[in-house]
Every structure is written in structure tokens, then in C-alpha cells.
Amino acid sequence: MKKSLFIFACLFSMVFSVAAQTKKPAAKKPVTAKKPQPKNQQVMSALKPLKQRVEISTDYGVMVVQLYDETPLHRDNFIKLVKQGFYDSLMFHRIINTFMIQGGDPTSKNADSNAMLGAGDIGYKIPAEIKPELYHKRGALCAARDNNPQQMSSGCQFYIVHGRRFTTNELEQIINSRNMGKKQEILYQIYQSDTVQAAVNALQNSQDKEAIRAYMDKVQKVADQAYKIKYPNAENVNNDQVQTYVEFGGAPHLDGAYTVFGELISGWEVLDKIAAAKTRPGDRPIQDIRMKMRLL
């Protein structure tokens, strides 16, 4: 068993050695003014259906979010719950300044001041709709979830990103760490397969160090190929997203792990006020912050 763990550790060390090869974010693109649209394009834009908007009234003021059509399962579920009045009188029960504000726990409606919140749910999950073009910029409306491997979302809990600005070096480290985690996961899955385990055991018994080294190289190449197939664009960097995180802020370390299904379009000062609220251990606000929603 100890020898197996040693070989697995060696495999991981080989994966870590490729981290430095991850592409760095490119320099920011200059911002250029948009050309006026021709009249016919302006007419066509006016004819496009507006995306659904939701007003969130709180003890600190009103925010308005816009739901994405690119995530129809989350959009339709949120609309359904708002129509039902599900969110009315619920709290923003978890607040972390420069990170996010979270709400939607149904048990928060009648919870006393000492209750630990965040475990309540509606009884179903929503399949993940994680898309690379929808990311955790400041004001992003996202679905909370537990640690299920399918990354399915809670049927009711959500969070709005407050976030902070990041440097390009910080973003590079986040991208490298995310990709490294993906590589480790694939390598671990391959190593745990019956075929590889049988081969490792046989090599251990033979005590042929050269054969072990050659087999490790083979497993590494298989893992690298599987990584490229599963994540073909993992090493690419979206310069627009980098510029947004540098200039506007967000929570880039959550990208690819949670569904983003909308964004804040007004009430930024309300987001800041809620995020700055004093909290107790467990990140619950000392004074309850309740919400009420309606479709616009």
C-alpha cells in the first residue's frame, strides 16, 4: 500500500510540474467607443424581447436583477418561485463582504435570532447550466449548491457576487490552480481504475524501477490526453473577463463550479450596504435583512 501511495505521489508531482506552462492572461485590450448602430439595426434591437427582470426589495433598498435566457432551467425556476411569493420575508442569511450575499433558505422566514441558517431547501435540485461566457463578475446572480459531483444547483438558494478587484497575477494563479485541480482529478480516476491498479501491483512485485518509471510516464500521457479532451479550452484566457475582474471585480475562483443565471442591473449601492452589514460567527447578519420579490 505504501508503495502505491508513493507512485501516486510521484504522478501528482509530475502533474504539478506542468503548472508553469499555463498561459498567462494577455495584456488588457484598449477600450474603444462603439459605433452608432444603423437605423435598421436599432429597430431590430427594439423588437428583441426584453430579458426577464426581477425587483428585490430589502431593508436596505431595492435591487433589480436580469435573468439570462442562456440558463432557461434556472431562469424559469426563479420566475416560478417569485410568482409564488416564495422569497417574500426570507433573509439574506449569509454575508461575506467583498465576496457575496446569499439568501433563499426557506427556514429563514420564521427563524429566531440564534438559529443557524443555510441548510434549508425546497426539495429538488436543478441541473447545472454552467457556461464559460457567464462568469462571476461583480453583481452576478448565481445558484448556491451543496457538494454533489454533478454540480446541480439548490432549487431555491442563490447568491449575488459582491466581489473585489483582482490583479492579473492573482488571476493567473487562480487559473493555474483550477486547471491543476482538474488534472489531479483525472489522474486520480485513472490511477484508481482496476487496470492501472493491477499493473502497479505487478510492477511492485517485480521491483523493476525502470519498468515502474516507464509505466508512470505512460499513465501521465494518458491523463494529459484525457485532460485535453475533457477541457479543450482550459488553457485559453478570455481577455474580456480578465479586464472585467481587474477593473470591475468579482469572484473568479468560483467560475466553472456554480451556475450563473443573471446579473444585477441596478441597486449597486444596496448591494454594497448589505455586504457591509455586521455579521456574527457563521456569517449571519446581526440584524435580519429580509427580502421581497416581484417580476418587472
Image (cartoon, helix red, strand yellow):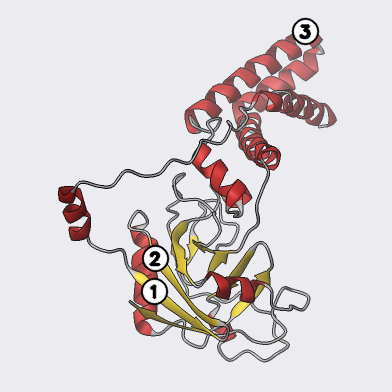
Mark 1 residue type: Val
The answer to the question of whether label 2 and label 3 lie on touching residues, with beta carbons closer than 8 A, is: no
- The residue located at (27%, 64%) in the rendering is 50
Residue matched to label 3: 210
Of the 4 image quadrants, the one containing the N terminus is: top right
Secondary structure under tag 3 reads helix
- Residue that badge 2 annotates: 66
- Categorize mark 2 by other alpha carbons within 10 Å: few (<14), some (14-19), many (20+): many
Q: Residues within 10 Å of mark 1 (few under 14, many from 20)?
A: many
Residue 54, located in which quarter of the rendered image?
bottom left
* Quadrant occupied by the C terminus: bottom left
Which image quadrant is residue 79 in? Answer: bottom left
Mark 2 or 1, nearer chain start: 1
C-beta proximity under 8 Å, tags 2 and 1: yes
The quadrant holding residue 219 is: top right
Residue with the mark numbered 1: 54
